Amino acid sequence: MTTDEARDLIRSVLREVAPEADLDEVGVEETLQEALDLDSIDFLNLVVGLHEATGLEIPERDYAQLATLDGCVTYLTRAQ
Amino acid sequence: MGDFRMPSLGADMDAGTVSEWLVKPGDEVHRGDIVAVVETEKSTIEVEIFESGVVDEILVEVGQHVPVGTVLARLIGTGPSAAHTAPGASVAVAHEAAPNVPSVIEEGPIRRPVPTVAATEAPAEAVGPVVPAMSETRSAPSPAPAGATGPGRVFSPVIRHLAERLGVELTSLDGSGPGGMVTRADVEKAAKRTTGPSARRVRSSPLARRLAAEHGIDLSAVPGTGPGGSVVEHDVQLVVSLATSEPAARPATGTESVTKVPVAEEPTAAVVEGRQAAMRKAIGALMARSKREIPHYYLSTTIDLSSASAWLERANLERPVSKRLVAPVLLLKATALAVARVPEMNGFMVNDESMPSEVVHVGVAVSLRTGGVIAPAIHNADKLSLDELMRALKNLVGRARKGVLRSSEMSDPTITVTNLGDLGVEAVFGVIYPPQVALVGFGRIAQRPWASDGMLGVRPCVTATLSADHRASDGHRGGLFLGEIDRLLQDPENLR
C-alpha cells in the first residue's frame, strides 16, 4: 500500500467513524483521539474499519502506533 | 380501542413533532413495531408501539407539534377487520392545528371530521388546503398502497419502512424468512442489486418538492437531512443558495447519499445551530430542575483495575478485531450487576416516593460532537453477556450520534452511567437525570501508584463516583453500592 492509498483509506474510515469531525483540521502528528474527540468505541471502530479494508489483524498492543494520522499511515504502509 | 400517544421520551421533553408515519389506517401493528418518527429537541426518535392491533385512525399529522400524552392514533383490537381496511376509513386525518390539542389528555383531541371529498384516495391532496407548514404528509411521493401490502402478503412496518428508504419494491421480492416472509436481509440485498436511478425513490416533503419545482432542481440530486434521509425544505434551500453563489458546486455528489446514507453529510449550519440551541435549552431546563429538586449527595472511590485490564487484554487477544471489547463495557456491566445488592439506586422518584425498578435499564450518557449529551438506555443490561453488551453499546452510540434513537430507549433508563474517561478527566460528579435517583460516573483509566499488601506498585485505576438522591438512599448505602462495583471488577469472571 502506498502512502497516498493509506492516507485515503484512513480518511474514509474516519469519515465513517466520526462523520461530524473536520478531518482537514487534524494535523498529521496530532493525537486522533484528542483532535477528533474519539472515545474508545470510536477508536475501536477505526481499527475495525482498517482491518476490514486491509485484512490486517491489528492486535491491541499495536494500538499505540495508530494514535496519529502519520502513525496510521506508517503502520499500514509498513505492514504489507 | 387503544390510544397511541405522544410518548415522553425523557423528562426533558414536553412536546414533540411527528415527522413521519410508518403506518396508515388499516395497517396491522405488533407490539414493538416502529410506527412513527418523532422529532424532539434532542434527537429523532423512532417510536415503537406497545400494543398490537389495527390502526384505526391517525389523529395527528406529520409536521404537527403536540404535547406529550396527545393521542396520535387510535388502534382497534387485533386481527385485521374488514370494516377498517375499507377505503372509506383510510384517511381520517385530524385537520386541526396544534393550538386546539388539549395539553391534558383525557378525552381525545379535538378532531373535526372535515368533510373532505377526496379523502378516500390520496392523502397528499386531501390535506392540501391546510396551512402549508403543518401539512407535510407522508413523505414518499407514491406510497403505493396496493403494493405495500400486496395481494395476500403482509409486511411489517419496519420492513416497509426499510424498503421505502432503500427504494425497494417489496412485492417483487421472494422472502427468505419463515413462511416466505420478507426479512431485513432480503430488502438490503435487493437494494444492493438495484442501484440504478430508476430504482431509486427520493423521499421528500411537500415543501421541498414545491421549492425544488420552483427552482427547477432535481430532487434526486439533493442530499437529504430529514428523517431517513428524506429531502426537506432546508436541503433544497441549501442547494438553491449554493447554485446561485457557485454554479455546479454540489448537486453531482448528491445522488448516492440520498438513498444510502440515512444522515446526510452536512446539514446546513442554520439547522445544526437551531438544534444545538434547542438541545442546550432542553438540557439546561432538565438539569436546573434536577439541581432544584433533587438533594444530591456525592461519593467517590478509586478502583484498582489491574485484574480487569489484564482479563480484557487476554480476552481481546483471542478475538478478531470486530469482536473486541472495550473497558467501558466492563464498567457498565459491573454497575448493572451491583444494583442487585443495593436496589434503591435503580429506579425512580415519583411524588417524593422512591420506586425501585425490577429491571435494570442502564442509560449511557453519549456526548454528541456537535454539542450536547443524550443518555439512551441499554435494556436489561444486567442480563446481557459482555459480548451482547458490547454490541448494544456500539449500536447505541452509533445511533445516538446519528440522531436516530428508539422511543423505548429514551423513556425508561433506571440508572445512568457517564463515562467521561476518554476525555481524560479523573472523575466526574454528574447531575442526576430526573426522575432517576442515581448516576454513576467513571473517569479516565490511568496508571497510578497503588499500595497493596505493604507494597507500592503502579496499576491501572479508575475513579468511580456516585451522585445519588438523598430522598431515595443515604451515603452508607451509596458507599456499599460503589464497593460492590469495585468487588465485581476485581474478578471479571463475575461479569461474563
Image (cartoon, coloured by chain):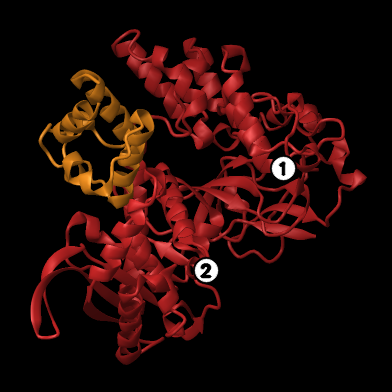
Q: Which of B239 and B143 is in front in this view?
A: B143
Taking the spot 19% from the left edge, 28% from the top edge, the residue there is: A78
Task: Specify whether B387 is left or right of B60.
Answer: left
Identify the residue position indicated by label 2 in the image: B383
Mark before the other along the chain sequence, 1 or 2: 1
Badge 2 amino acid: Lys
> The numbered mark 2 sits on a residue in which chain?
B
Residue B431 shows in the view: no
How far across and down, in percent of the image, does residue B23 sit? 70, 42
Q: Is residue A11 above or below residue B422?
A: above
Neighbours of disc 1 within 10 Å: few (<14), some (14-19), many (20+): many
Residue B226 shows in the view: yes
Q: Are marks 1 and 2 in contact (CB under 8 Å)?
A: no
Badge 1 amino acid: Ser
How far across and down, in percent of the image, does residue B147 sit? 78, 27
Q: The red chain is which one?
A: B
